[in-house]
Image (cartoon, helix red, strand yellow):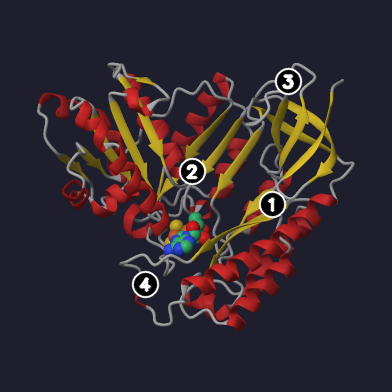
Amino acid sequence: MISNTYKIITYGCQMNESDSERMGAQLESIGYRKIEDFKEAQVILINTCCVRESAENKIFGKIGELKHIKQQNPAVILGVTGCMAQKDGEALLKKMPHLDFVLGTNKIHDLCGLINKLKAKRKHLVDLAPADGGPMEEVMPPKSSSWSVWLPIMYGCNNFCTYCIVPYVRGREHSRPLEAILQEAQQYAKQGVKEITLLGQNVNSYGKDISKSSFAELLARLDEIKGLERIRYMTSHPRDLSDEVIKVIKYSKHICTHFHLPVQHGSDRILKAMNRGYTTASYRHLIEKIRSEIPGCSLTTDIIVGFPGETEDDFQMLEDFMREIRYDAAYTFLYSKRSGTPAAKMENQVPQEVKKQRLQKLMDMQNEISLQINEDLRGKILEVIVEGPSRTDENVYTGRTATNKIVLWPKRGTEKAGDLLRVKIEQPQTWVLKGEALYE
Ligand code: 5AD
Ligand code: SF4
């Protein structure tokens, strides 16, 4: 064990990754240093997700695995943060007594205080604010040396989709003040950051709770910041995406032309049971509007297969709808029963085997569509922001287009992460586009 070192193991969505960065910044402010190997770290945090049961099971496995580290080195500080921490609190300590603390999602700004308390007096600690304990305090931003950063703009969700645990865990929507976000973005731009990704469970309703600003205004102001090449955001709710936001994106210089609009299902009966607040007709209308205003934009989605009561007919409607919309890519999930949500109590839960078969069918169909869409890009020259060497070959570089497509090319020039580069697409595939960089 190396003293004053930490490791954060992160599960789940981008919001968790962002929270981990901010917790890391706090630990660094009191002299800790990040290391890769958790076996060597003095403070180990597991930042958790509870959106699906499969995630929870994996995390329980990981926490169990850490037991022998604690046995070998009782001085190691072991904590659980994130959504499972907020949801289960004290119960986690009872189930896993080798843990030192549990820190809720609305208390991450207090991490250093908690670590200091633990050092002074070793005992189990739980620090949870109620999920809806009012606006979250500002959390220290990471001192980023990276070219790309997460930027949370709001926390929580007001939607209560009937399958989803998030609103119970993360509480109601709380927007960060517009000025705080702009200031942070300006600071990043000065440090050389080229790409920011705005985060929130439902970014389109940004500002509604503080009534002084809107997502459209925030995007327009961020677009003016010198040095930022790419502005991304996630996640959008199809019901709340305003015409004004579409207009701002259309006339912006740096806002990416990629729309991630989770439809979740293609049967109106299921959408109603999910409490999504839109119909297939209104969703279709929205997509038509976006595609006519911003031709060439890309569209991705999230889908849940096997929601309670989903019949073969409903599933057929989902398949037909996805075929009609033609998404560039879709993230497909098996419905997972989350206790405490209304859907968990619904009758006609779909058997796991049926869910799996339907999911496979949908994925096969979507892969075909993704490949067809990418095939149209053969021979095109696309501008990418360089991300760096690919995972499998350091001579092959990877980058992303403004439409969020991953591009791979053999590196022959001096390009580095954060640079803009033009690449001619020669071999489109389902998930990536392979090509040759144009150096001139
Ligand atoms: N089961 C399966 N998928 C879920 N999601 C949210 N809750 C559940 C659940 N109970 C999916 C939704 C959401 C994505 C982040 O996770 O598709 O958009
Ligand atoms: Fe969950 Fe729905 Fe909120 Fe997304 S919008 S976080 S799916 S409740």
**CB under 8 Å between discs 4 and 3:** no
- Give the image location of residue 233, x and y in percent: 57, 45
Residues under numbered marks 1 and 4 in contact, where contact means CB atoms less than 8 Å apart: no
Residue 14 - label: 2
Q: Mark 3 = which residue? A: 415
Q: Are marks 2 and 1 in contact (CB under 8 Å)?
A: no
Q: How far is mark 1 from mark 4, CA to CA?
A: 39 Å
Residue 224's x, y, as percent? 63, 33
Number of numbered discs = 4
**Amino acid at circle 3:** Glu
Q: CA distance from mark 3 to mark 2?
A: 27 Å
Q: Quadrant of residue 267?
A: bottom right
In contact (CB < 8 Å): disc 3 and disc 1: no
Pick the residue in front: 164 or 283.
164
Which amino acid type corresponds to the residue marked 1 in the rendered image? Lys
Query: What's the residue type where badge 4 is placed?
Result: Ala
What is the secondary structure assignment of the residue under circle 4?
A: helix
Residue that carries the numbered disc 1 in the rendered image: 247
Mark nearer the viewer, 2 or 1: 2
Q: Which mark is residue 344?
A: 4
Earlier sequence position, callout 3 versus callout 1: 1
